[in-house]
Amino acid sequence: MKKLLKYLTLAAPLAYMAFIWLLSSKPSDAILNFGFTFEDFLKESLHLVEFGILFGLIILAFWTLGKSGYRYQVSAAVIAILYGLLDEIHQYFVPYRSATLIDFIKDTIGVLVLFYILRHYEKKEDSRLSRVINEVKDFLSQ
């Protein structure tokens, strides 16, 4: 069971990247269409979340491989940010989609926020979140 969890953790970033690619290949209202202005707000805020999640999945994959530390966190951030750029380039060629610098900036902010949270709480010893981070890291690296 633990071996299966490790394989799933390693495959998760690639599966999630494929999911992002699939969603980016469809018109912007193909998945979510609320029909009022909340839709735009929700879709715009998803940029922050979706690439933060990608960063987190890459970090978990690194931990599964026994790789942790600042260098791997930066590597995960760079991979997630570059994938955000690739996603925007991809959307440029998709009809009814747009590629904008502001979307790429939102993708990057999402990654950097989670990067900061991880850096900040990983080192704090008296934090509940720090304990959870280190327990997950220890569990995955065994």
Image (spheres, rainbow, N blue to C red):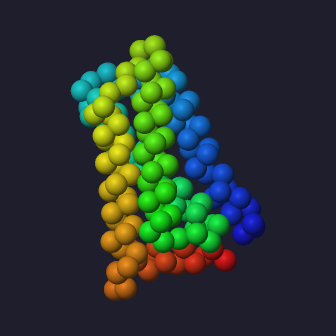
Task: In the displayed orientation, state which residue is furthest to the front.
Answer: 71
Q: Is residue 20 visible?
A: yes
Classify 123 as above or below 94. below
Q: Quadrant of the C terminus?
A: bottom right
Residue ID at (65%, 67%):
65
Residue ID at (46%, 63%):
73
Classify 3 as above or below 31. below
Classify 61 as above or below 129. above
Q: Is residue 43 left or right of residue 2?
A: left
Q: Nearer the viewer, residue 125 or 119?
A: 119
Task: In the displayed orientation, state which residue is furthest to the bottom.
Answer: 126
Task: In the displayed orientation, state which residue is furthest to the left.
Answer: 37
Q: Tell me the quarter of the picture where residue 10 sits.
A: bottom right
Q: Tell me the quarter of the picture where residue 127 sits.
A: bottom left
Residue ID at (34%, 54%):
112
Residue ID at (58%, 69%):
67
Q: Position of residue 136 (x, y in %)?
A: 54, 73
Q: Quadrant of the N terminus?
A: bottom right
Q: Position of residue 109 (x, y in %)?
A: 31, 48
Q: Position of residue 89 (x, y in %)?
A: 45, 27
Q: Nearer the viewer, residue 116 or 69?
A: 69
Q: Is residue 31 visible?
A: no
Classify 123 as above or below 89. below
